[in-house]
Amino acid sequence: MSEGNNDLSAHIVNAAHTCAKRSTPYFTRFLSEGEQAELKYLRLPAGVFARYYAGEKNTEYQRAVLGVFPDRFSDIGEQQLDTMYPVRAVTVTYRRQDEINHRSVLGTLISLGIDRDTVGDIYIGDGTAIVYLYDTVSDYVRDAVRKIGGVGVEVCEGVAAELPERQYKELKLSVSSLRLDTVLGHIVSVSRGNALDKYIKAQRVSVNSVLCTDASKVLSPGDKIAVRGVGKFIFHSVDGEGRKGNIHITVKKYI
């Protein structure tokens, strides 16, 4: 499950040929939004079809497993296809007065020696977190995790509650333009020049899951901005214009 990004497409195409020849499904590791974008126009050989699955109830996913199936599976219902994927969920419960976050959950899993490629989406709610995992590690996580970030937790199989809504921190910003370097500078609290040198030129910024090195790119509401080492953001809205011509915007940071 450890295909590298550079040869991901070739690896999947080769696996698809094997899938067609042996008439058995093939499943990738969890793929990021960027990797899913890279595969958008992937051409598979005749005799197979592909679809993503990210776990029970997880329809608005960021990380997902791509399954490649022989055409003989095309008459099988969607729900039955879902059950064939090596994706499982665990529910983490803790006291409502305690707090855990995405980073502390992921950090706990990594500290146990779990490969990032086997971890899917993580949803955090009040007293509940849902974690999607490859089935090779789900039982281990259920049995091994007793604390996350110093908070005592209990872990059980499956989605034991409704998925919590994704949580955001809302940033109200006043910017001189909607250029990427300008908006990014306000998001990470550095000058426009530092945003260019430290993040954009360093290839640490993606817009809508595609690496972006164009500092002059004009952003629009709905754009998703990922900054490696900082976090993920959504350009939520343009809220008006200030007296000095500055543009008031709202950006939401995933937390």
Image: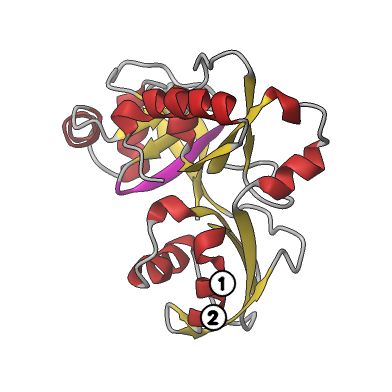
Q: Which residue is mark 2?
A: 143
Q: Check the image and name the residue furthest to the front.
A: 22
Residue 230 magenta = yes
Residue 217 falls left or right of residue 161? left
How far across and down, in percent of the image, does residue 57 sit? Answer: 74, 50
Camera-nearest residue between 121 and 225: 121
Question: Which numbered tag is attached to residue 182?
Answer: none
Q: Which residue: 66% across, 41% down?
A: 60
Q: Which residue: 62% across, 45% down?
A: 54
Q: Which residue: 50% across, 56% down?
A: 255
Residue 125 falls left or right of residue 146? right
Residue 242 in view (yes/no):
no
Assess whether mark 1 and mark 2 are in contact (beta carbons under 8 angstroms).
yes
How far across and down, in percent of the image, does residue 138 sit? Answer: 55, 66
Camera-nearest residue between 80 and 23: 23
Q: Main secondary structure of the magenta part?
A: strand
Residue 20 in view (yes/no):
yes
Q: Which residue is mark 1?
A: 139
Residue 222 magenta = no
Classify mark 2: residues with Cα within 10 Å, few (<14), some (14-19) or many (20+).
Answer: few
Q: Is residue 97 above or below residue 75?
A: below
SS class, disc 1 = helix
Residue 122 falls left or right of residue 49? left
SS class, disc 2 = helix
Q: Is residue 131 above or below residue 55?
A: below
Camera-nearest residue between 153 and 192: 153
Q: Is residue 112 above or below residue 40?
A: below
Three-letter residue code for mark 2: Asp
Q: Quadrant of residue 67?
A: top right
Tell me the magenta residue range.
229-238
